[in-house]
Structures are given as C-alpha cells and as structure tokens.
Image (cartoon, grey):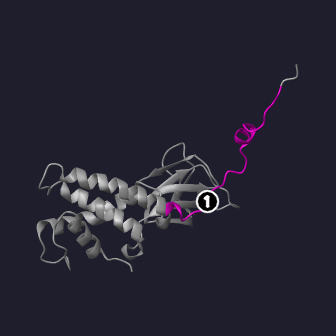
Amino acid sequence: MPLTRVQIISQALTLMGKKPIMNLTNQSDIVTAADNAFDYLLQATLSEGFWRFATRIVVLNLNVNVPIGGYWMYSYQLPADYLKLVHLWPQNYDFEMYENFQMYSNFNNSSQPLYLEYVFAPVISNLPPYFVKYFAYELAAYLALNNAQKPDYYQVLDNKKGIELAIAQAADAQNRPQTPLQSAPMLQRRFVTTFASG
C-alpha cells in the first residue's frame, strides 16, 4: 500500500522516539521542521544516486535560440522535473548543463533524436517500500541534528541510515537486468596445465 507524506514523516518521528502523528496541522516545531525539509531532502536524496524507480527517458527538444557564447552551437530544453543526468543517447560528451534547465551541446543530427535518461522526483505515493524505509531514516537523521537528546543520538540514526541505503540500493538494482560474464579467458586458463617440452 502506498504511503503518504504524513505517514513517512510519522515514521521518521517514531524512529526518533517521538509520538506518531495523524496530520501536519497544529503540530510541534519538529513536525513543522520535518514537513519543511521533506521535499528538499527527497530531491537531494534522489539526485545523489541512480534510482531505477525514479528514472525516465525522453526525447530532448532542440531550442530555436542559439546559446550565448562562441563554443556551443545548440541548446536543448531539459524536462521541468529533471534532477540528474543518467545517460544521453547517442552517447556523447560534448555538452554542459546550464541555468533554466538548458543543456548546451554541439550535437545535432536531424535524422537522429537525442534521448535523455534522467532521475526525477516521482509522486510520493509511487515511492517503493524499500526506498521509503531508507528515506524515513534520512529524514530522522536530519531532524536529530537539531533535536538530539544525547550526543550520540544522531550517530546511531546516521549509521542505520547507511545500512538502509545499501539495502535500498540493492533492491533497486534488481529493477534492471544483470549483465552475465560472457567470457573469462583468465579464469578458464588457470585450469589448463602447460608442460614445456624438454
């Protein structure tokens, strides 16, 4: 069952030893801080990794206006929900990201569209359970910095956050096929004994 913003914040508060909440209105300062930090932390967390559930592919639109500057010949409009580049196809390295969601490049092939694979911020109800579990620790650790009751309180949450991040990334990695080892001549060669003729 998809979780809501309130449920995720409530889980983060529970991890901190606070009472769970049912809504975000007329709440304590820490609940308000959690609500204020939620979107910022979610986008920052998504943009720091490669999450398959938050990755999409689009065709980039070529802008009519030529970029300012002598080096770049073309500009492309990035999607409004763009957070992080994953891959361009056809693959090229002659580009830079600039303000106003612009990508300047020298690539233009009228017979070949330019595809962008990128990380975006999905709707909260579409976040998978393994990510929500990790993100609750991310939010709790953030809140613990200004609400710690003991000096080592943040450290405990931060350590657990690291473990949950590894678990979430491993689960998310299953959303793409694993490339098998096709040829391993060095591994096969170790079982062959060669005798020099004397």
Q: Find disc 1 in the rendering and name its residue.
A: 114
Quarter holding the C terminus?
Answer: top right
Amino acid type at image mark 1: Leu
187 vs 127, left or right, is right
The picture places residue 176, in percent across and down from the top left corner, at 57, 63
> In the rendered structure, which segment of residues is drawn in magenta?
172-195
Closest to the observer, 40 or 65: 40
Residue 155 placement (x, y as % from top left): 23, 50
Rendered position, 2 above or below 98: below
Position of 77 compared to 4: left or right? right
Which image quarter: residue 141?
A: bottom left
Badge 1 local density, few (<14 within 10 Å), some, or many (20+)? some
Q: Main secondary structure of the magenta part?
A: loop
For the residue pair 167 and 103, the one nearer the viewer reads as 167
Vertical placement of residue 164 versus 27, above or below: above
Please provide percent x and percent y for residue 118.
Answer: 50, 60
Res 101 seen here: no
Magenta stretch holds residue 180: yes
Answer with left or right where residue 183 lies relative to residue 137.
right
Is the N terminus in the top left, top right, bottom left or bottom right quadrant? bottom left
Query: What SS does tag 1 mark?
Result: loop
Determine the residue located farthest toward the top in the rendered image.
Answer: 198
Front residue of 106/138: it is 138
Q: Residue at x 47, y 59 (%)?
A: 170
119 with respect to 35 (left or right)? right
Residue at image position (61%, 62%) is: 177
| Residue at (78, 37) in percent of width and height | 192
